[in-house]
Image: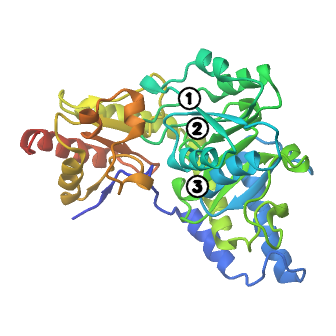
């Protein structure tokens, strides 16, 4: 049975260039912190990856760039470092307010919930009904105690694209000292950034390697150099002082090299029309679906994520049926797929519990073909006709 893999928002196939750079790095024995020539070679691999990542995010390559790259193990660690690092960096005489959205990834909401229980933060969650955030609601939530605003770029379940540039510009116009963070895990190397992250007014950005065809186990937090310099973000892991003291622990050299390779390959795809091609594939797939399937399509969306609500067929039933035909999709975030609770993201979007329980996510990649999507559409059509409805 041939596999049709359409769960690329959960993880992706390791691409050829990523594998090539990773294998090359495995031949280097040196610790990047060592001063001998093997250590220097290893350090060079990391610095080259750092430069490639900054360039991909639109940061000008200078001897002292505006942003620093802190390599981590995963997007969850990067988000935790951004949130906990900012909120615990200083002793304040007040409980700092954090503004986020009610459909953020669990790595953001769970971290903030923990900090709130510890008395280190007050959380304000903005509505994301219909996949949009209202500027007026954000403006009303800002006050003199607001320290941090964290809003994702692309929602991992609905594909909603939030207007980070407009939202963060509003925040900075009210108070330039408020720190802005965006989890760009689902948007990085998938949608083009006009002007890069400096134009977004983002002080900190999370990216993850395994979402862009690098292996699991490597990610990064890109943060304004001034925040580190002024001590406005503190490390979570302490020890040998790697990553300029912001993330101790010997760097994952093969993983970082692999991330570099994935960025190179994804950049080439973006430059050659990835978004247009994926948009066309999406349109073809959606047009082939039966009328009784509802497309949960926000006003502004990333074309590689498609949220479908089946006609009173539980998502687990649909997943099992498609899996039996070699088609891999998901019912939401892979990070919470084993929990027995409904999707808070879909509830925030506006779906009823029954609708959310009948919703699956299709997510595409540069390797997705029209034939694969045709097969998936045909299988979904068959499922609508044969699967038991509740």
Secondary element at image label 3: helix
What is the x, y in percent for residue 275? Answer: 51, 36
Q: Which residue is mark 2?
A: 152
Q: Which one is nearer the viewer's eye here, 76 or 213?
A: 76
> Which of marks 2 and 3 precedes in the sequence?
3
> Which of marks 3 and 1 precedes in the sequence?
3
Secondary element at image label 1: loop
Q: Is residue 54 left or right of residue 376?
A: right
Instruction: Tell me if residue 84 comes above or below residue 236 in the rendering.
Output: above
What is the x, y in percent for residue 117? Answer: 60, 47
| Disc nearest the viewer among 1 and 3 | 3
Instruction: Tell me if residue 195 comes above or below residue 335 in the rendering.
Output: above
Disc 1 to disc 2, C-alpha distance:
7 Å
Q: Is residue 250 left or right of residue 290?
A: right
In the rendered image, the quadrant that contains the N terminus is: bottom left
Q: Which mark is residue 76?
A: 3
Q: Which residue is mark 1?
A: 162
- Residue closest to the far top: 136
Q: Kindly indicate the quadrant of the structure image that contains residue 129.
A: top left
Disc 3 to disc 2, C-alpha distance:
13 Å
Residue at x-position 81% and y-position 71%: 43
């Amino acid at each position: 049975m041939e596999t049709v893999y359409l769960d690329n928002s959960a993880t992706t196939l390791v691409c050829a260039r990523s594998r090539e750079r990773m294998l090359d790095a495995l031949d280097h024995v040196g610790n990047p912190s060592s001063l001998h020539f093997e250590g220097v070679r290893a350090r060079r691999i990391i610095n080259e990856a750092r430069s490639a990542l900054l360039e991909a995010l639109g940061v000008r390559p200078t001897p002292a760039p505006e942003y620093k790259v802190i390599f981590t193990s995963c997007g969850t660690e990067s988000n935790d470092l951004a949130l906990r690092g900012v909120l615990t960096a200083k002793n304040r005489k007040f409980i700092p307010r954090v503004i986020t959205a009610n459909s953020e990834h669990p790595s953001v909401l769970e971290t903030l919930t923990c900090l709130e229980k510890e008395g280190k933060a007050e959380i304000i969650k903005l509505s994301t009904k219909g996949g949009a955030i209202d500027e007026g609601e954000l403006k009303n939530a800002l006050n003199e105690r607001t320290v941090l605003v964290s809003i994702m770029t692309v929602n991992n379940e609905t594909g909603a694209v939030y207007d980070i540039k407009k939202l963060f510009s509003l925040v900075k116009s009210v108070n330039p000292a408020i720190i802005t963070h965006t989890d760009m895990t689902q948007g990085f190397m998938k949608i083009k950034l006009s002007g890069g992250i400096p134009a977004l007014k983002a002080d900190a950005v999370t990216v993850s390697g395994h979402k862009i065809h690098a292996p699991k186990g490597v990610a990064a937090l890109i943060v304004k150099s001034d925040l580190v310099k002024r001590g406005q973000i503190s490390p979570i892991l302490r020890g040998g002082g790697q990553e300029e003291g912001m993330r101790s622990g010997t760097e994952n050299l093969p993983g970082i090299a692999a991330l570099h390779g994935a960025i190179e390959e994804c950049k080439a795809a973006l430059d050659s029309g990835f978004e247009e091609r994926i948009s066309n594939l999406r349109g073809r797939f959606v047009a082939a679906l039966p009328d009784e399937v509802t497309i949960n399509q926000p006003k502004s969306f990333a074309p590689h994520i498609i949220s479908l609500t089946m006609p009173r067929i539980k998502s687990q039933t649909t997943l099992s049926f498609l899996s039996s035909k070699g088609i891999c999709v998901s019912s939401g975030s892979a990070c919470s797929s084993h929990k027995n609770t409904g999707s808070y993201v879909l509830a925030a979007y506006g779906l009823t519990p029954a609708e959310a329980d009948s919703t699956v996510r299709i997510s595409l990649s540069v390797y997705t073909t029209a034939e694969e999507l045709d097969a998936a559409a045909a299988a979904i059509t068959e499922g609508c006709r044969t699967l038991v409805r509740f």
